[in-house]
Image: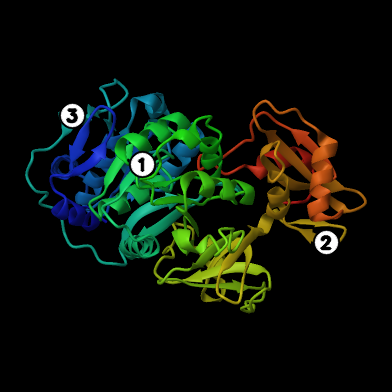
Amino acid sequence: MIDYFDRGARIAHASPCLVTDERVRTYDAVRARSNRIGNGLIRDGFASGAHAAVLSGNDPRAFECILGLLRADGVWVMANHRASEDENAYLLDLLDVDTLFVHSEVADRIARFRADCPTIRRYIALDRPFPEADAFLEDWLGDDGEVAQRREGRPEELAFLGATGGTTGRSKGVMLTNLVWQSLVSSLVASMPMKVAPVNCVAAPMTHAAGPLALASMALGGTVVVLPRFEPAAVLDAIERHRVTYMFLPPTAIYMLLGEPDVRRRDLSSLEYISYAGAPMSLDRLREAIEVFGPVMNASFGQTESPMCVTALPPHEHLDARGDLARPGSCGRANLLSIVEVMDDDGTILPPGERGEIVVRGPLVMAGYYKDPRATAEVSRFGWHHTGDIGMRDEDGFFYIVDRKKDMIITGGFNVYPAEVEQALQAHPAVQDCAVFGVPDDKWGESVTAVIELRAGVAADTAAILAFARERLGPVKTPKSLSFIDSLPRSNAGKVLRAELRRPFWQGRERTI
């Protein structure tokens, strides 16, 4: 992975690499820092192939530590500081982390990690000294020399470890190789060709898609503008100030940008791409986004096990000749390096128009789940990686995600996919976002229900929303009940946690959630 950063550093050595409001770090400076961090690790007994993690929010120093551990021939463990202490302790132990760089915001977790994560030898304070850590980064750094331990990595070797979202059970470690990284960067460049070196705004958490995408942009000598957190006004300010050309945001964050009162008065003309993924996007909001931001929206489909861009729908394929959505709801066609199909439960590849599970082959697929051969075998049936997503493809090879396989509702013998119902509800002008799921019903087996987050300042009108939905969905798919919530529960990646909302209804029942 480090070779891709070094490519960017060679072609843009004096150009800005990591930018905040306070400071600009050039490629030369970041490369030197990564050398010093790598030397510090080697001096500290960090072995080739050892695992290291950075527990921090969006921070340029976090990026430098990731590059440093890669330069020391380490494996990057993508830890998430926004996860719970229990989840962090579980994953850091499961993934055999040797060294942990820790931001002061989560320093109080170190005591728990020392008790539950025996493989961690060293805790390095990232941003300032604090007593829970073994050393402070600035005092611990090695010298400025080249890292002596570097060797050429092989494509099949482990490069980084991700973690599944944990929305349907305990998170699993995902083994991603150098070849996966090479395939990811290549697929991104092919699906989003850049006219100039990108200016990438990292506003979504770098512990998810935004972080790897920022590292990938460094291969092109791009500038990475790091915002500490997602705040809509600050994002719009950054786009104007730094002439941002590219950013990744989950749909929920895009909705929040669209809700900013002055968004239509901002100068957003520098944007070339806004990538969105991770959850279905309301078609009405997508049309609004194209109107506000321009023809820059880039959809993709992937997951931790086959990251980012198994399929892609670039901006020019979003719109037809009349300027309307050409393929509403599509996540695009398979990238150049992936074979994507739709399969039934018996392993038969289905023809266009039929619904089944989306399966993937190719170098973008993980090597397996870390220390979990049974789960690896389960998702690798028939020689394909099984995504767990129900979808279909059309005659032209465009894919459409229907829903997660485990989220399908069976009511009165009919299959209802929550995402379809959510799309209809999100088209109502009062609805900011929603979650649809099945609840026990003595007559129908399950009945469709919805929990709705309203737009700011709008009053709830259950009858009007249900009537609106019935016109679009018919009686079977229309929710039998609605409830309202101030803010839907979301994962750290911004996905609405249907399982959390559904769980109280299924206590003591047989359905797995």
Residue extending farthest to the left is: 145
Q: Residues within 10 Å of mark 1 (few under 14, many from 20)?
A: many
- Say which residue label 2 marks: 414
Q: CA distance from mark 2 to mark 3?
A: 61 Å
Marks 2 and 3 close (CB-CB < 8 Å): no
Residue sitting nearer the eye, 293 or 323: 323
Give the residue type at disc 1. Cys
Residue 18, picture quadrant: top left
User: Could you tell me if the residues under marks 2 and 1 are in contact, i.e. CB atoms within 8 Å?
Assistant: no
Counting other residues with Cα less than 10 Å from the Cα at mark 3, is it few (<14), some (14-19), or many (20 or more)? some
Check disc 2: other Cα within 10 Å, few if <14, some if 14-19, many if 20+: few
Sequence order check, earlier mark of 2 and 3? 3
On screen, residue 185 above or below 136: below
Q: Nearer the viewer, residue 139 or 219?
A: 219
- Quadrant housing the N terminus: bottom left
State the residue in front, 483 or 360. Answer: 483
Q: Nearer the viewer, mark 2 or mark 1?
A: 1
The answer to whether residue 509 is seen in the rendering is no
Q: Nearer the viewer, residue 127 or 239?
A: 239
**Residue 87 at x, y = what percent?**
50, 38
Of labels 3 and 1, the one closer to you: 1
Q: Amino acid at mark 3?
A: Glu
Q: Residue most toward the right?
A: 443
Residue at the spot of label 1: 201
Which one is earlier in the sequence, the residue at label 3 or at label 1? 3
Left or right placement of residue 474 versus residue 222 in this view? right
Q: Residue at x 26, y 36 (%)?
A: 19
Residue identifier under label 3: 138
Q: CA distance from mark 2 to mark 1?
A: 44 Å
- Expressed as whole percent of the image width and height from the top left, the position of residue 225 reads 31, 39
- The image quadrant of residue 237 is top left
